[in-house]
Protein backbone atom coordinates (compact mmCIF):
# COMPACT_ATOMS: atom_id res chain seq x y z
CA UNK A 1 0.00 0.00 0.00
CA UNK A 2 1.21 3.50 -0.79
CA UNK A 3 1.70 6.21 1.79
CA UNK A 4 -0.62 9.17 1.12
CA UNK A 5 0.59 12.77 1.38
CA UNK A 6 0.21 14.74 4.60
CA UNK A 7 -3.40 15.82 5.18
CA UNK A 8 -5.14 18.75 6.74
CA UNK A 9 -6.48 17.46 10.05
CA UNK A 10 -9.91 18.52 11.33
CA UNK A 11 -12.35 17.42 13.97
CA UNK A 12 -16.08 17.94 14.40
CA UNK A 13 -18.53 17.40 17.22
CA UNK A 14 -21.16 14.71 16.81
CA UNK A 15 -24.57 14.71 18.47
CA UNK A 16 -23.41 13.04 21.69
CA UNK A 17 -20.17 15.00 21.93
CA UNK A 18 -17.97 12.42 20.20
CA UNK A 19 -15.31 14.04 18.01
CA UNK A 20 -14.50 12.19 14.79
CA UNK A 21 -10.93 12.50 13.53
CA UNK A 22 -11.01 13.86 9.95
CA UNK A 23 -8.31 14.12 7.30
CA UNK A 24 -8.61 16.13 4.08
CA UNK A 25 -6.33 15.62 1.08
CA UNK A 26 -6.10 17.58 -2.16
CA UNK A 27 -6.98 21.11 -3.19
CA UNK A 28 -9.84 23.19 -1.89
CA UNK A 29 -12.39 23.67 -4.63
CA UNK A 30 -11.69 20.32 -6.28
CA UNK A 31 -14.56 17.82 -6.56
CA UNK A 32 -15.13 16.32 -3.12
CA UNK A 33 -15.10 12.64 -2.21
CA UNK A 34 -15.89 11.26 1.26
CA UNK A 35 -14.50 7.79 2.05
CA UNK A 36 -15.94 5.86 5.01
CA UNK A 37 -14.12 2.77 6.27
CA UNK A 38 -15.56 -0.36 7.78
CA UNK A 39 -15.53 -2.37 10.99
CA UNK A 40 -12.09 -2.69 12.66
CA UNK A 41 -10.43 -0.45 10.07
CA UNK A 42 -9.32 3.22 9.94
CA UNK A 43 -8.44 5.99 7.49
CA UNK A 44 -5.34 3.96 6.59
CA UNK A 45 -7.63 1.53 4.79
CA UNK A 46 -8.14 4.08 2.00
CA UNK A 47 -4.43 4.79 1.37
CA UNK A 48 -4.52 3.64 -2.26
CA UNK A 49 -7.62 5.69 -3.07
CA UNK A 50 -6.24 8.78 -1.33
CA UNK A 51 -3.01 8.49 -3.29
CA UNK A 52 -4.78 8.00 -6.62
CA UNK A 53 -7.56 10.57 -6.21
CA UNK A 54 -6.09 13.46 -4.23
CA UNK A 55 -4.19 14.91 -7.19
CA UNK A 56 -7.44 16.13 -8.78
CA UNK A 57 -10.05 15.69 -6.04
CA UNK A 58 -10.56 16.79 -2.46
CA UNK A 59 -10.57 13.50 -0.56
CA UNK A 60 -12.14 13.48 2.91
CA UNK A 61 -11.65 10.50 5.22
CA UNK A 62 -12.49 10.01 8.88
CA UNK A 63 -12.16 7.37 11.56
CA UNK A 64 -15.43 5.80 12.65
CA UNK A 65 -16.01 6.17 16.39
CA UNK A 66 -13.65 4.06 18.45
CA UNK A 67 -11.46 3.36 15.44
CA UNK A 68 -8.13 4.97 14.56
CA UNK A 69 -7.95 8.41 16.18
CA UNK A 70 -11.68 8.84 16.83
CA UNK A 71 -12.57 8.26 20.50
CA UNK A 72 -15.55 6.15 21.42
CA UNK A 73 -16.33 8.57 24.25
CA UNK A 74 -18.61 11.55 24.06
CA UNK A 75 -20.19 13.67 26.77
CA UNK A 76 -21.24 11.52 29.69
CA UNK A 77 -19.15 8.45 28.93
CA UNK A 78 -18.71 5.89 26.19
CA UNK A 79 -20.48 6.73 22.99
CA UNK A 80 -23.19 4.36 21.81
CA UNK A 81 -22.58 1.64 19.25
CA UNK A 82 -25.65 2.12 17.07
CA UNK A 83 -26.46 2.80 13.45
CA UNK A 84 -27.88 6.16 14.55
CA UNK A 85 -24.44 7.03 15.96
CA UNK A 86 -22.88 6.16 12.59
CA UNK A 87 -25.33 8.53 10.89
CA UNK A 88 -24.75 11.26 13.51
CA UNK A 89 -20.99 11.11 12.95
CA UNK A 90 -21.32 11.26 9.17
CA UNK A 91 -23.58 14.31 9.44
CA UNK A 92 -20.99 15.99 11.66
CA UNK A 93 -18.21 15.23 9.16
CA UNK A 94 -20.21 16.54 6.21
CA UNK A 95 -21.01 19.72 8.08
CA UNK A 96 -17.37 20.20 9.03
CA UNK A 97 -15.86 19.67 5.60
CA UNK A 98 -18.39 20.80 2.99
CA UNK A 99 -19.83 24.23 2.41
CA UNK A 100 -23.62 24.70 2.55
CA UNK A 101 -25.09 23.08 -0.54
CA UNK A 102 -21.78 21.60 -1.67
CA UNK A 103 -22.09 18.05 -2.94
CA UNK A 104 -19.73 15.10 -2.83
CA UNK A 105 -19.49 11.48 -3.86
CA UNK A 106 -19.75 9.33 -0.73
CA UNK A 107 -18.12 5.88 -0.74
CA UNK A 108 -18.53 3.42 2.10
CA UNK A 109 -16.91 0.03 2.61
CA UNK A 110 -18.59 -2.60 4.82
CA UNK A 111 -19.76 -0.72 7.95
CA UNK A 112 -19.03 2.46 6.00
CA UNK A 113 -21.68 1.44 3.48
CA UNK A 114 -24.04 0.77 6.36
CA UNK A 115 -23.30 4.30 7.55
CA UNK A 116 -24.60 5.63 4.24
CA UNK A 117 -27.76 3.54 4.55
CA UNK A 118 -28.28 4.71 8.13
CA UNK A 119 -27.89 8.37 7.12
CA UNK A 120 -29.75 8.25 3.82
CA UNK A 121 -32.83 10.11 5.09
CA UNK A 122 -30.87 12.67 7.16
CA UNK A 123 -30.97 16.32 6.07
CA UNK A 124 -27.18 16.64 5.78
CA UNK A 125 -26.99 13.56 3.61
CA UNK A 126 -29.73 14.84 1.31
CA UNK A 127 -27.98 18.21 1.11
CA UNK A 128 -24.48 16.95 0.34
CA UNK A 129 -24.68 13.57 -1.41
CA UNK A 130 -24.36 13.66 -5.20
CA UNK A 131 -23.86 9.90 -5.57
CA UNK A 132 -22.82 6.93 -3.46
CA UNK A 133 -20.74 3.77 -3.65
CA UNK A 134 -21.62 0.74 -1.52
CA UNK A 135 -18.60 -1.55 -1.38
CA UNK A 136 -18.55 -4.97 0.29
CA UNK A 137 -21.62 -4.37 2.40
CA UNK A 138 -25.19 -5.37 3.14
CA UNK A 139 -28.28 -4.02 4.84
CA UNK A 140 -29.54 -6.97 6.92
CA UNK A 141 -29.13 -10.71 7.66
CA UNK A 142 -25.34 -10.36 7.60
CA UNK A 143 -24.63 -13.22 9.99
CA UNK A 144 -26.99 -15.65 8.26
CA UNK A 145 -25.52 -14.83 4.84
CA UNK A 146 -21.87 -14.90 5.92
CA UNK A 147 -19.75 -17.77 4.60
CA UNK A 148 -16.92 -17.43 7.13
CA UNK A 149 -17.90 -20.80 8.62
CA UNK A 150 -17.63 -23.46 5.87
CA UNK A 151 -20.97 -25.14 6.52
CA UNK A 152 -24.37 -25.27 4.89
CA UNK A 153 -26.61 -22.28 5.69
CA UNK A 154 -28.73 -22.76 8.77
CA UNK A 155 -29.02 -22.16 12.48
CA UNK A 156 -25.77 -23.89 13.40
CA UNK A 157 -23.71 -21.88 10.92
CA UNK A 158 -25.39 -18.65 11.98
CA UNK A 159 -24.75 -19.35 15.66
CA UNK A 160 -21.07 -20.21 15.07
CA UNK A 161 -20.59 -17.15 12.86
CA UNK A 162 -22.06 -14.90 15.53
CA UNK A 163 -19.69 -16.36 18.11
CA UNK A 164 -16.66 -15.84 15.87
CA UNK A 165 -17.48 -12.26 14.89
CA UNK A 166 -18.27 -11.30 18.48
CA UNK A 167 -15.34 -13.13 20.10
CA UNK A 168 -13.73 -11.17 22.94
CA UNK A 169 -10.32 -12.79 22.56
CA UNK A 170 -7.56 -10.27 21.81
CA UNK A 171 -6.15 -10.43 18.29
CA UNK A 172 -2.60 -10.00 19.56
CA UNK A 173 0.39 -9.27 17.33
CA UNK A 174 0.37 -9.75 13.58
CA UNK A 175 1.85 -13.17 12.88
CA UNK A 176 1.95 -15.56 9.91
CA UNK A 177 -0.91 -17.51 11.51
CA UNK A 178 -3.05 -14.43 12.12
CA UNK A 179 -2.48 -13.29 8.53
CA UNK A 180 -3.63 -16.67 7.21
CA UNK A 181 -6.76 -16.43 9.32
CA UNK A 182 -7.46 -12.88 8.16
CA UNK A 183 -6.90 -13.82 4.51
CA UNK A 184 -9.32 -16.73 4.82
CA UNK A 185 -12.04 -14.67 6.46
CA UNK A 186 -11.77 -11.38 4.63
CA UNK A 187 -9.67 -11.60 1.46
CA UNK A 188 -9.47 -13.55 -1.76
CA UNK A 189 -7.09 -16.54 -1.99
CA UNK A 190 -4.82 -14.77 -4.48
CA UNK A 191 -4.44 -11.49 -2.61
CA UNK A 192 -0.84 -10.25 -2.60
CA UNK A 193 0.98 -10.90 0.70
CA UNK A 194 1.84 -7.23 1.23
CA UNK A 195 -1.85 -6.32 1.02
CA UNK A 196 -2.74 -9.03 3.51
CA UNK A 197 -0.10 -7.67 5.87
CA UNK A 198 -1.35 -4.11 5.47
CA UNK A 199 -4.91 -5.14 6.31
CA UNK A 200 -3.77 -7.24 9.25
CA UNK A 201 -1.93 -4.29 10.79
CA UNK A 202 -5.01 -2.10 10.45
CA UNK A 203 -7.45 -4.67 11.84
CA UNK A 204 -5.21 -5.71 14.75
CA UNK A 205 -4.91 -2.06 15.80
CA UNK A 206 -8.65 -1.84 16.52
CA UNK A 207 -9.32 -1.94 20.30
CA UNK A 208 -10.96 -5.15 21.44
CA UNK A 209 -13.90 -3.42 23.12
CA UNK A 210 -14.64 -1.41 19.98
CA UNK A 211 -14.42 -4.51 17.80
CA UNK A 212 -16.83 -6.42 20.03
CA UNK A 213 -19.19 -3.48 20.52
CA UNK A 214 -19.68 -2.93 16.82
CA UNK A 215 -19.92 -6.69 16.13
CA UNK A 216 -23.17 -6.76 18.12
CA UNK A 217 -24.58 -3.94 15.99
CA UNK A 218 -23.65 -5.76 12.79
CA UNK A 219 -25.14 -8.98 14.11
CA UNK A 220 -28.57 -7.37 14.57
CA UNK A 221 -28.42 -5.03 11.57
CA UNK A 222 -31.59 -4.04 9.74
CA UNK A 223 -31.12 -1.10 7.39
CA UNK A 224 -33.45 -2.23 4.61
CA UNK A 225 -35.53 0.93 5.02
CA UNK A 226 -32.36 3.03 4.65
CA UNK A 227 -31.61 1.37 1.32
CA UNK A 228 -34.99 2.48 0.00
CA UNK A 229 -34.23 6.04 1.17
CA UNK A 230 -30.88 6.05 -0.66
CA UNK A 231 -32.26 7.90 -3.66
CA UNK A 232 -29.02 9.30 -5.10
CA UNK A 233 -27.31 7.40 -7.95
CA UNK A 234 -25.62 4.48 -6.22
CA UNK A 235 -23.12 1.92 -7.47
CA UNK A 236 -22.50 -1.42 -5.76
CA UNK A 237 -19.17 -3.30 -5.71
CA UNK A 238 -18.49 -6.75 -4.23
CA UNK A 239 -15.82 -9.42 -4.46
CA UNK A 240 -17.00 -12.81 -5.70
CA UNK A 241 -14.94 -14.44 -2.90
CA UNK A 242 -16.30 -12.17 -0.16
CA UNK A 243 -17.17 -14.42 2.77
CA UNK A 244 -18.21 -11.67 5.21
CA UNK A 245 -20.72 -9.86 2.97
CA UNK A 246 -21.14 -12.24 0.03
CA UNK A 247 -22.48 -11.28 -3.40
CA UNK A 248 -26.05 -12.30 -2.51
CA UNK A 249 -26.20 -9.22 -0.24
CA UNK A 250 -24.84 -6.94 -2.98
CA UNK A 251 -27.38 -8.26 -5.49
CA UNK A 252 -30.15 -7.64 -2.98
CA UNK A 253 -28.94 -4.04 -2.60
CA UNK A 254 -28.84 -3.55 -6.36
CA UNK A 255 -32.40 -4.83 -6.68
CA UNK A 256 -33.69 -2.59 -3.86
CA UNK A 257 -31.88 0.70 -4.48
CA UNK A 258 -34.10 3.32 -6.13
CA UNK A 259 -31.30 4.46 -8.47
CA UNK A 260 -28.72 1.70 -8.77
CA UNK A 261 -26.26 2.67 -11.52
CA UNK A 262 -24.35 -0.57 -11.61
CA UNK A 263 -23.37 -3.76 -9.79
CA UNK A 264 -19.72 -4.79 -10.18
CA UNK A 265 -18.61 -8.23 -9.03
CA UNK A 266 -14.81 -8.44 -8.84
CA UNK A 267 -13.71 -11.96 -9.69
CA UNK A 268 -11.64 -13.66 -6.99
CA UNK A 269 -11.64 -10.67 -4.65
CA UNK A 270 -12.71 -10.93 -1.01
CA UNK A 271 -14.22 -8.49 1.44
CA UNK A 272 -11.37 -5.94 1.44
CA UNK A 273 -11.78 -4.82 -2.18
CA UNK A 274 -10.42 -1.25 -1.77
CA UNK A 275 -7.11 -2.85 -0.72
CA UNK A 276 -7.29 -6.03 -2.81
CA UNK A 277 -8.42 -4.35 -6.05
CA UNK A 278 -7.64 -0.66 -5.52
CA UNK A 279 -7.67 0.28 -9.19
CA UNK A 280 -11.18 -1.12 -9.71
CA UNK A 281 -12.63 0.61 -6.64
CA UNK A 282 -10.91 3.89 -7.50
CA UNK A 283 -12.29 3.68 -11.05
CA UNK A 284 -15.80 3.18 -9.69
CA UNK A 285 -15.43 6.31 -7.56
CA UNK A 286 -14.05 8.31 -10.50
CA UNK A 287 -16.98 7.23 -12.65
CA UNK A 288 -19.45 8.50 -10.07
CA UNK A 289 -17.60 11.83 -9.86
CA UNK A 290 -17.52 12.22 -13.64
CA UNK A 291 -21.17 11.22 -14.13
CA UNK A 292 -22.85 12.90 -11.16
CA UNK A 293 -20.62 15.55 -9.59
CA UNK A 294 -18.29 17.37 -11.99
CA UNK A 295 -21.09 19.22 -13.75
CA UNK A 296 -22.04 20.79 -10.43
CA UNK A 297 -18.53 21.28 -9.04
CA UNK A 298 -17.59 24.66 -7.68
CA UNK A 299 -20.68 25.00 -5.52
CA UNK A 300 -18.31 26.22 -2.86
CA UNK A 301 -15.55 24.88 -0.68
CA UNK A 302 -14.82 25.29 2.95
CA UNK A 303 -15.82 24.03 6.33
CA UNK A 304 -19.00 24.45 8.24
CA UNK A 305 -19.30 25.54 11.85
CA UNK A 306 -17.89 23.81 14.88
CA UNK A 307 -14.58 22.78 13.30
CA UNK A 308 -11.16 22.58 14.86
CA UNK A 309 -8.08 22.61 12.63
CA UNK A 310 -4.92 20.83 13.77
CA UNK A 311 -1.93 22.37 12.02
CA UNK A 312 0.13 19.25 12.63
CA UNK A 313 0.05 16.64 9.89
CA UNK A 314 -1.12 13.13 10.64
CA UNK A 315 1.47 10.43 10.90
Image (tube, helix red, strand yellow):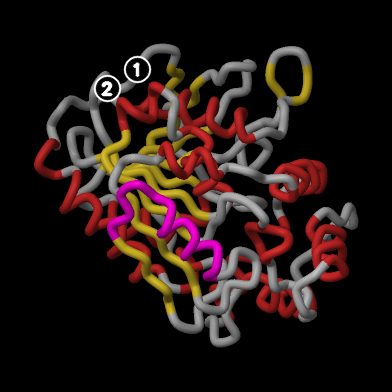
In-image side of 82 versus 292 (left or right) = right
In the rendered image, residue 146, in percent from the top left (x then y), is placed at 69, 67
**Image location of residue 131, percent across then percent down:** 29, 44
Residue 252, placed above or below residue 70: below
Q: Residue at x 57, y 50 (%)?
A: 139
Q: Main secondary structure of the magenta part?
A: helix
Q: Position of residue 109 (x, y in %)?
A: 50, 54
Label number found at residue 304: 1
Mark 2 in CB contact with mark 1 (< 8 angstroms)? yes
Q: Which element carries disc 1, helix, strand or loop?
A: loop
Magenta part of the chain: 247-261
Q: Is residue 112 left or right of residue 95?
A: right
Q: In the drawing, does residue 245 fall left or right of residue 127? A: right
Of pointers 2 and 1, the one earlier in the residue sequence: 2
Residue depicted at x 34% and y 40%: 231
Q: Is residue 193 above or below residue 21?
A: below
Q: Is residue 259 magenta?
A: yes
Bin the neighbour count of mark 2 within 10 Å (Cα to Cα): few under 14, some 14-19, many 20 and up.
some
Q: Nearer the viewer, residue 60 or 163?
A: 163
Please say whether residue 95 is one of the residues in the magenta stretch: no
The percent position of residue 199, horizontal first and vertical second, equals 60, 65
Residue tagged 2: 99
Seen from the viewer's position, the closer of residues 212 and 201 is: 212
Vertical placement of 204 versus 265: above or below? above
Q: Residue at x 14, y 44 (%)?
A: 294
Amino acid sequence: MTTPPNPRVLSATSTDGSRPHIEVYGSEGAPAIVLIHGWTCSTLFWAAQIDALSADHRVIVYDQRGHGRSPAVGRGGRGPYTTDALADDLEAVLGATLAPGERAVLAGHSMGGMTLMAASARPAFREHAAAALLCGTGSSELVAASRVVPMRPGRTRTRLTRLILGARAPLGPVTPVSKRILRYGTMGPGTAPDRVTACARIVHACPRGVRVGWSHVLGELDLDAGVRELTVPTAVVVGTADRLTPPVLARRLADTLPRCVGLTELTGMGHMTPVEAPEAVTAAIRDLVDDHLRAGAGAGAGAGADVDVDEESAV
